């Protein structure tokens, strides 16, 4: 039986927290890019790097007159609104992040917002992350809990509701009162679509729940047209119906290991579907004509070196597809800055101009007013923390709204240097180095204490965008190396597939090869290398000091995996989790010898160096038992270690106090073990 969870919103209402907040005015000119400084680097306060961005998730009202944003101040997050032209921020909702966190806030009309929240819970014996929706007026009044409870339930009975209730698939921009929400049924767990009134919470069924459905898509006329399904035999299928409705037909059916065709959405033509599929070994964007039985594909956007994907950027009212939301750094060797992620000619020209005005950054058009004239731009880059700009297409101007990290002085930021190396089997690997101020790769300087920082996922990737972690570590005098090891996203199907079921094997060897390269280049002091990571990166940190203990001076694992068979059992509690684990990590029985050999908690006696473990008790991605078991194994083996358990902490360090405590513990641990040569 699924437990019904009541959601108290009273503590979210803000009384006087923002009463003394200083006004944030609209700047008239974009900020200068940071210049390199020749002065010796000083340690900036830990809190400047450990804090969440001051502003995140900014969105623009339909008429383009107001913004809404998530404002992070110490341990509290506030949903706030403000006129685009400037003035004081108006508090709308607030949370202390102890039990609930905001995911996002978005305008549904010019006076009302819909806000998504998440919280950790349990259903029977399984830990979950629950999401709910609340709507509120822009001045903080008129709060409406959009959680739906079963009819006929009483306070003396167990009440049930859906786990995920924030999956809006269509904002119905011409409506202003309703949205389309995909939602699972409480009893059968099948996925359907409802029309939700954000002013009353009333719901009506648009698409009846279907077995195996994972995702629904609407067309520009707001009709549910396409569904993605997981079939009982382990295959995926994409099904569609005609614009006027009728019988559903299967467009594509494929195994996850094969080249899939993943729908992205429709443009104004109800028979033209944009999809993500393979092109010459890389993911690319195609359009497909559904009214042609042969389903011909037309290539829209591809890159010879990297996968192309993401979400579609649309004109709000017409539904015209303008391109792919987001852009690469303007003018580097991965993107020529010509606005190539957008294919609508006027918007492509606009992005090209933005890239010229803000060179060397990732310039992302994130939202626009309904008339398409005003838009929001988020711009960040190498050594440049994120900034929000508001643009006006009629006037041809952009103006700075606010900095995401206002406390980080330009003079303390150094950025990343990109290079490429080869693994022992010849596979090319992209590497990013962040060096202390005044140091450049190949400058002949003295070898430095180095932190190897493998990313999580493992199916994600590092890039040269702003990174508070690498800047913090470089500010403390360390060289920082990030490696896109095999299995990382963005480099094509073969590169990603090379990491399947290779945890602790070739994936780990790639990291070892990168460290040895850095030592050979005199970037790293061979006696002062520490491996640090979170999630999969935490696993790689632990496995590094198991497999090559002579290579590292210490290891830090945040929310890291330590016992692969236990992780597979944990994943099997979730829909599709066992199938995903079998493919990515290995089969619980068929690969049990390999899984045990590559589980750090079962190999603790091989570790020779100090280990720092940090984990939150409310982590729903990697359960806290993974670090508890690792700590117990280290203790039993008599190995030096420290274990910090963060009560109520999640997988993403979402609470300020937890982030700050982790950064402080990391700084102290690295100072202790990397200060002097071994």
Image (cartoon, helix red, strand yellow):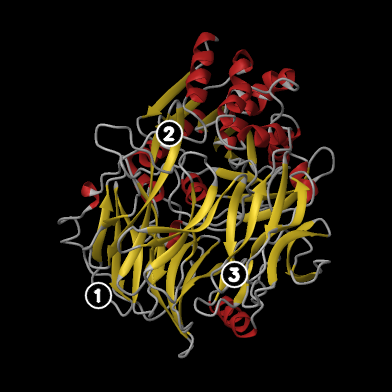
Marks 2/1: CA distance? Answer: 46 Å
x and y percentages locating residue 7 in the rendered image:
30, 44
Q: Which mark is residue 87?
A: 1
Q: Is residue 11 left or right of residue 566?
A: left
Looking at the image, is mark 3 or mark 2 earlier in the sequence? 2
Q: Above or below — where is 60 with respect to 141?
A: below
Residue 488 visible (yes or no): yes
Kindly identify which residue carries mark 2.
2
Binning the other alpha carbons within 10 Å of mark 1 as few (below 14), some (14 to 19) or many (20 upward) gives some
Could you say whether the residue bearing mark 2 is in a helix, strand or loop?
Answer: loop
Q: Above or below — where is 629 with respect to 303?
A: above
Q: Nearer the viewer, mark 1 or mark 3?
A: 3
Residue 672 visible (yes or no): no
Marks 1/3: CA distance? Answer: 38 Å
Binning the other alpha carbons within 10 Å of mark 3 as few (below 14), some (14 to 19) or many (20 upward) gives many
Looking at the image, is mark 2 or mark 1 earlier in the sequence? 2
Q: Which mark is residue 120?
A: none
Q: Above or below — where is 395 with respect to 261?
A: below
CB within 8 Å, label 1 to label 3: no
**Quarter of the image where one finds residue 661:** top left
What residue appears at the point 67 percent right and 35 percent down from the top-left corner?
579
x and y percentages locating residue 293 in the rendered image:
81, 67
Kindly identify which residue carries mark 3.
219
x and y percentages locating residue 454 in the rendered image:
61, 40
């Amino acid at each position: 039986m699924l437990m019904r969870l009541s959601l108290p919103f009273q503590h979210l209402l803000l009384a006087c927290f923002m009463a003394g907040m200083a006004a944030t005015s609209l700047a008239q000119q974009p900020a200068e890019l940071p210049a390199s400084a020749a002065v010796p680097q000083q340690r900036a306060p830990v809190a400047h790097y450990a804090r969440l961005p001051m502003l995140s998730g900014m969105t623009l009202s339909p008429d383009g007159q107001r913004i809404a944003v998530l404002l992070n101040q110490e341990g509290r997050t506030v949903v706030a609104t403000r006129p685009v032209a400037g003035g004081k921020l108006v508090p709308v909702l607030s949370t202390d992040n102890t039990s609930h966190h905001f995911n996002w806030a978005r305008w549904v009309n010019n006076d009302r917002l819909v806000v998504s929240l998440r919280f950790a819970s349990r259903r029977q014996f399984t830990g979950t992350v629950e999401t709910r929706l609340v709507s509120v007026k822009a001045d903080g009044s008129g709060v409406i809990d959009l959680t739906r409870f079963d009819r006929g339930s009483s306070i003396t009975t167990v009440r049930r509701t859906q786990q995920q209730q924030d999956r809006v698939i269509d904002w119905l921009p011409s409506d202003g009162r309703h949205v389309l929400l995909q939602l699972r049924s409480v009893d059968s767990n099948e996925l359907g679509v409802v029309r939700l009134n954000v002013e009353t919470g009333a719901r009506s069924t648009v698409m009846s729940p279907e077995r195996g459905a994972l995702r629904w898509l609407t067309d520009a006329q707001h009709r549910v047209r396409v569904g993605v399904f997981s079939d009982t035999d382990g295959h995926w299928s994409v099904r569609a119906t005609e614009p006027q409705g009728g019988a559903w037909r299967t467009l594509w059916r494929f195994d996850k290991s094969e080249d899939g065709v993943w729908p992205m959405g429709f443009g104004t033509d109800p028979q033209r579907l944009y999809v993500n599929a393979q092109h010459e070994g890389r993911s690319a964007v195609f359009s497909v004509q559904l009214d042609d039985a042969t389903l011909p594909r037309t290539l829209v956007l591809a890159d010879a070196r990297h996968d192309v994907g993401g979400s579609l950027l649309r004109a709000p009212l017409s539904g015209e597809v303008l391109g792919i939301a987001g852009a690469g750094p303007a003018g580097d060797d991965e993107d020529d800055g010509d606005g190539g992620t957008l294919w609508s000619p006027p918007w492509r020209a606009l992005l090209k101009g933005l890239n010229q005005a803000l060179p060397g950054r990732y310039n992302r058009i994130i939202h626009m007013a309904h008339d398409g004239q005003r838009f929001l731009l988020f711009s960040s880059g190498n050594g440049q923390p994120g900034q929000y700009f508001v643009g006006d297409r009629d006037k041809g101007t952009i103006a700075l709204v606010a900095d995401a990290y206002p406390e980080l002085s330009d003079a303390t930021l150094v950025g990343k240097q990109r290079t490429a190396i080869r693994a022992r089997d010849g596979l090319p690997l992209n590497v990013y180095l962040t060096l202390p101020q005044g140091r450049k790769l190949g400058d002949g300087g003295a070898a430095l204490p180095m932190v190897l920082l493998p990313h999580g996922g493992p199916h994600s990737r590092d890039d040269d965008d702003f990174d508070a972690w690498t800047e913090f570590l470089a500010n403390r005098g360390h060289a920082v190396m990030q490696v896109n090891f095999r299995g990382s996203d963005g480099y094509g199907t073969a590169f990603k597939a090379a990491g399947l079921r290779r945890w602790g094997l070739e994936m780990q060897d790639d990291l070892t090869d990168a460290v040895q390269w850095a030592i050979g280049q005199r970037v790293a002091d061979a006696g002062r290398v520490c491996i640090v990571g979170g999630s999969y990166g935490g696993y790689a940190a632990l496995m590094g000091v198991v497999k090559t203990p002579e290579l590292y001076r210490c290891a830090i694992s945040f929310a890291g995996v330590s016992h692969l068979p236990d992780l597979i059992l944990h994943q099997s509690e979730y829909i599709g989790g066992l199938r995903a684990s079998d493919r990515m990590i290995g089969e619980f029985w068929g690969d049990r010898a390999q899984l045990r050999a590559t589980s750090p908690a079962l190999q603790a006696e091989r570790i020779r160096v100090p280990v720092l473990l940090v984990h939150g008790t409310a982590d729903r991605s990697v359960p806290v038992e993974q670090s508890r078991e690792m700590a117990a194994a280290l203790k039993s083996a008599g190995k030096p270690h420290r274990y910090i358990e963060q009560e109520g902490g999640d997988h993403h360090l979402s609470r300020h106090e937890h982030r700050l405590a982790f950064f402080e513990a990391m700084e102290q641990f690295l100072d202790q073990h990397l200060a002097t040569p071994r």
